[in-house]
Image: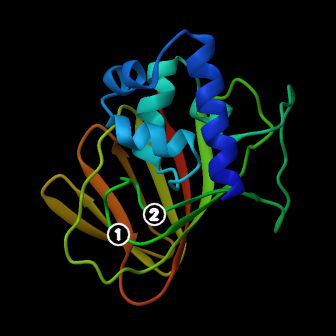
Amino acid sequence: MAENSRIGSKIVTVRESLGLSASELAERSGCELAMIEQLEAGELAPSLAPLIKITRALGMRLGTLLDDDTEVGPVITRRDEAERVSRVKSLETSSDAGVLDFFSLAAGKTARHMEPFLIDVAPSAAQDHTLSSHEGEEFIYVLSGAVEVEYGKQTHVVEAGDSIYYDSIVPHEVRAAGESTARILAVVYAPV
């Protein structure tokens, strides 16, 4: 919950510095006002697609919202040192695709254009899936287990050692394939 509050506080700070109301941010980002208010209050676990829309509407990088530190030079993240930056229900707030735990691999790097994460993708019993869509590109490399990537009207099973690279503007969802948690390396590019 502290992570949700920190992200919510950053959204409020930037939004207010731009002189925007929560309803104006909702309109600019294409997100529902209730979701903006819940994110800002720290009552809702943030998810990737709405956060990308919000950061674009605020004119900031996604990493600025997720990171605390700033580093000018290269950032090295040693094994087992990746910081958990958020727990996301899925890539869309309304989805039941399972819980995704994000671990940032570049938390201290400023002015970056890519967001590299280790993500643990937990299985879900949900049958209905809500696809997300946002500007940018995503690269996923499966480290262990397997994931299903629903991309447009197709579903691809991507197993350990496999990778997939796609345009994020096409509706998509990443979820665990089967009953085991999968671990993936994901690199997300979202233009500002």
Per the rendering, the mark at residue 39 is none
Q: Is residue 142 shown left or right of residue 91?
A: right
Q: What is the spatial separation of the Cα atoms under label 2 and label 1, in whole angstroms?
A: 7 Å
Which residue is painted at 48% across and 46% down in the image? 38
Per the rendering, the mark at residue 97 is 1
Q: Secondary structure at mark 1?
A: loop
Give 181 or 6, whichever is nearer the viewer: 6
Q: Quadrant of residue 9?
A: top right
Whether 19 is drawn above or below 153: the answer is above
Per the rendering, the mark at residue 89 is 2
At label 2, counting other C-alpha atoms closer than 10 Å, the crowd grade (few under 14, some 14-19, many 20 or more) is many
Q: Is residue 35 shown left or right of residue 118?
A: left
x, y percent for residue 97: 34, 69
Q: Secondary structure at mark 2?
A: loop
Which residue is painted at 74% across and 44% down in the image? 106
**Residue type (three-letter) at the residue carrying disc 1:** Ala
**Looking at the image, do the residues carrying marks 2 and 1 touch, with CB atoms under 8 Å apart?**
yes
Q: Quadrant of residue 26?
A: top left
